[in-house]
Image: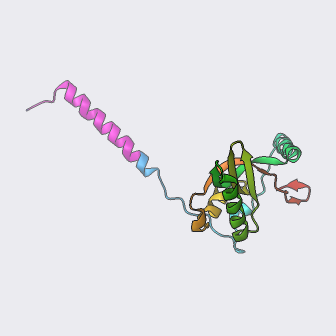
Amino acid sequence: MRSFGGKSAIGTLIIIVLASFGLQAQNGTKAVAPPPAIADGSFIWQRLDVVSGSEIADLLRQQYDLGRRTGTMPGYRLQLFFGSGVQARAHAEKIKSDFNRLNPETKVYLIFKSPDFIVRAGDYRTRSEALKILRNLTSGFANAFIVSDDIAFPVPAVQEGTIR
């Protein structure tokens, strides 16, 4: 009868233990299904009431007040143009007017940071909001991309004395 050497038996045992951990990790993963719709078509998170302490409400109020004082908050915009040179201003104004004509509901900003002209559009609170608009842009704005910027502070919807 042939016996295994001490080193190879320990090596085999380590491989078996590591392989079993890998199998256990795979068993723990599950596909995440979207939450079920409620009878009226809304999703559960649209009906959640968050109960929190007064400290959280105070912090939210401070953030709200800061935004009201400065008129801005962190957010995202689409950058449509960035350039300098003799014709940069004329080109930036053309891009701004073209975008305004195609998207009259979206505010467009022409910014001058010496020596560059920048054209940015929109006031989006989340990157996903900006991405939705970016995907729908026509080929005339193929070089557009999302940038983080201070955006105009949105008017909050106040309902029964609480900020939503």
Please tell me which residue is depicted at 72% across the width and 65% down the height of the picture.
97
Name the foreground residue: 18 vs 2: 18
As drawn, 67 above or below 104 = above
Instruction: Say if the magenta span includes residue 12.
Output: yes
> Is the C terminus in the top left, top right, bottom left or bottom right quadrant?
bottom right
Side of 24 where 107 appears, left or right:
right
Q: Position of residue 56 (x, y in %)?
A: 81, 42
Please tell me in which quadrant of the rendered image residue 135 appears.
Answer: bottom right
| Residue ID at (72%, 43%) | 113
Which picture quadrant has residue 125?
bottom right
At which x and y percent is residue 141?
60, 62
Query: From this viewpoint, which residue is outermost toward the front?
Result: 86
Residue nearest the observer in this picture, 76 or 26: 76
**Measured from the top left, where is residue 146 in percent x and y?**
63, 53
- Where, quadrant-wise, is the N terminus in this rendering? top left
Quarter of the image where one finds residue 101: bottom right
Q: Is residue 35 above or below residue 63?
A: below
What secondary structure predominates along the stretch shown in magenta? helix
Q: Which residue: 66% across, 53% down?
A: 88
